[in-house]
């Protein structure tokens, strides 16, 4: 903004200076050209020529002042608009950058949270699997213990049955050997008396 204003001021100062310098060169040219055809020095016609040039330059300055000023003011306005547009784009880019940085920070935090959550879930799964394995091992131990006790009881009862059978066989053999026919008849008679009495 300050650059545009200083440019505008310097242009308004420079344009009349350029016109005066041009006028000086024109005067010098007229004076030099007057020396070939007539007397040397400043002549009245030279004054008229300078005045004509000055009037022409003033008229040109007066006529061209508004279009030139309008051109430069429109150019300045265009530059201002471009600068404002660039400032808006710069601000939009700055906001976009801030948004992306915020999103990146959020993503970093979310990814850290996700990692911590996965670690926590992994630890919970590990504990659960270990607990299930321990429970399964305890069940297997209980089942094995029951099976062993059952097998032991079955073997014990089978052994007892076998011992009883052997004892009965031995007792039967002993009874047969030690009881005579008369003893058998006596036992049968006694049994029958008990049955009849009851």
Image: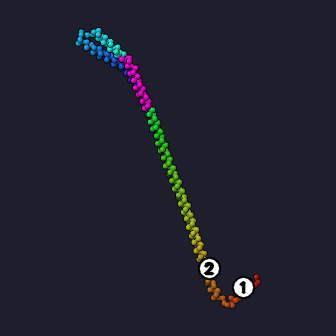
Residues rendered magenta in the picture: 60-87
Residue located beneath label 2 in the image: 164
The residue positioned 73% from the left and 86% from the top of the image is 192
Placement of 132 over or under 100, stated as above or below: below
Q: Percent x, y for residue 116? A: 50, 49
Q: Nearer the viewer, residue 4 or 143?
A: 4
Q: Quadrant of the N terminus?
A: top left
The residue positioned 34% from the left and 16% from the top of the image is 57
Mark yes or no: residue 169 visible.
yes
Q: Counting residues from the N terminus, which is met first, the one under dot 1 or under dot 2?
A: 2
Q: Quadrant of the C terminus?
A: bottom right
Placement of 158 over or under 105, stated as above or below: below
Residue 6: name its quadrant.
Answer: top left
Q: Percent x, y for residue 48? A: 31, 11
The residue positioned 50% from the left and 51% from the top of the image is 118
Prevailing secondary structure of the magenta residues: helix
Looking at the image, what colour scheme do you see? rainbow
Q: Residues within 10 Å of mark 2 (few under 14, many from 20)?
A: few
- Check residue 176 for magenta coloring: no
Q: Percent x, y for residue 180? A: 66, 90
Residue located beneath label 1 in the image: 191
The residue positioned 61% from the left and 84% from the top of the image is 170
- Check residue 69 for magenta coloring: yes
Residue 166: name its quadrant.
Answer: bottom right
Q: CA distance from mark 1 to mark 2?
A: 25 Å
Q: Percent x, y for residue 7? A: 38, 23
Mark yes or no: residue 9 visible.
no
- Circles 1 and 2, Cβ within 8 Å, touching? The answer is no
Q: Secondary structure at mark 2?
A: helix
């Amino acid at each position: 903004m300050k650059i545009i204003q200083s440019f505008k001021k310097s242009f308004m100062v420079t344009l009349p200076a350029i016109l005066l310098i041009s006028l000086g060169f024109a005067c010098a040219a007229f004076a030099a050209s007057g020396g070939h055809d007539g007397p040397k020095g400043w002549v009245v016609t030279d004054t008229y020529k300078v005045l004509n040039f000055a009037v022409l330059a003033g008229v040109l300055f007066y006529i061209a002042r508004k279009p030139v000023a309008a051109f430069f003011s429109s150019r300045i306005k265009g530059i201002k608009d471009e600068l404002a547009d660039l400032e808006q784009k710069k601000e939009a880019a700055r906001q976009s950058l801030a948004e992306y940085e915020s999103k990146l920070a959020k993503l970093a935090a979310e990814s850290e949270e996700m990692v911590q959550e996965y670690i926590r879930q992994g630890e919970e799964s590990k504990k659960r699997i270990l607990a299930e394995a321990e429970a399964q091992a305890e069940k297997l131990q209980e089942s094995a213990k029951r099976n062993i006790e059952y097998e032991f009881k079955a073997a014990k009862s089978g052994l007892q049955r076998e011992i009883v059978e052997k004892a009965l066989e031995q007792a039967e053999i002993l009874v047969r050997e030690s009881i005579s026919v008369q003893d058998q008849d006596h036992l049968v008679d006694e049994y029958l008396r008990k049955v009849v009495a009851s």
